[in-house]
Amino acid sequence: MLAIAGGKGGSGKTTTTACLARGLAGEGRAPIAVDGDCDMPDLHLVAGACPRPGIGAYEGGASLDEVTHSAVELPGVEVLPAGRGGVGALEATMEQLAATPRPVVVDTPAGASPVVATALRAADAVVVVSTATPESLEDAAKTAAMARTLGTRVLGAVVTRSAGRIEPEPLLGCQTLAHVPDVTAPLTDETVAARYDRVVDEVAERNI
């Protein structure tokens, strides 16, 4: 299970979740993309998937097949939306998904809330996402530190809207997996896809 996290809202976590899930699907791995942002869920909008039922129904006893939905924008990916879930439902969902052999990518909310901590504890590793601004990178460093405190491996960082002129490794204490350029339609841009494919290769190499 891979968590996608970062301190600032709008840093590109949801797009990163979608692009990594799409890359995993391209390798035939049938990933599940989970919207862990219970307060402001939007993964279903990016992916073109139904918004419910979601993690609340899953906690209530619905099957995984009943709560995962095909993504129009992400062929081969199934989306588990937040639905009407909360922190408790997310925690139960993470526990249940830990047993699935399919790769799971979890989109987390911004900040350092209990929801983020729940996803990080359950994940095998985290990819930290930040834009190239100093403020966003400072918040991303806090996210990386939080993950380490919780015992979650920091796989590396994805820097979005970046021309590659800033190297955040000394600040974040982890390798930079990709610099993703600022484009109008990231889900259909070939350069963006190639950058995220490198991250997918890293995920596969680490058996996550």
Image: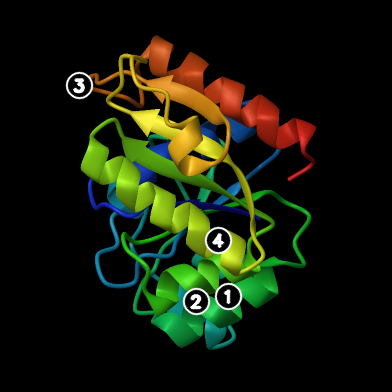
Task: Give me the residue at 23% from left, 46% from top.
Answer: 10
Q: Which mark is residue 184?
A: 3
Secondary structure, mark 3, is loop
Cα distance in 3D space between marks 4 and 2: 17 Å
Would you place residue 178 above or below residue 190 in this image?
below
**Amino acid type of the residue that numbered disc 4 sits on in the rendered structure:** Ala
Mark 4 or mark 2: name the one nearer the start of the chain. Answer: 2
The residue carrying mark 1 is 93
Is residue 50 or residue 110 the one in the foreground?
Answer: 110
**Towards the viewer: 155 or 165:** 165
Q: Secondary structure at mark 1?
A: helix
Point 59% across, 86% down: residue: 61
Residue 17 visible in the current orientation:
no
Q: Amino acid at mark 3?
A: Thr
Question: Who is closer to the viewer here, 43 or 163?
Answer: 163
Q: Mark 2 packing: few (<14 Cα in 10 Å), some, or many (20+)?
A: many
Residue 20: where, in percent of width, then height?
Answer: 52, 35
Dot 4 corresponds to which residue? 147
- Mark 3: give few (<14), some (14-19) or many (20+) Cα within 10 Å: few
Q: Residue at x 61, y 34 (%)?
A: 25
Quadrant in which the C terminus appears: top right
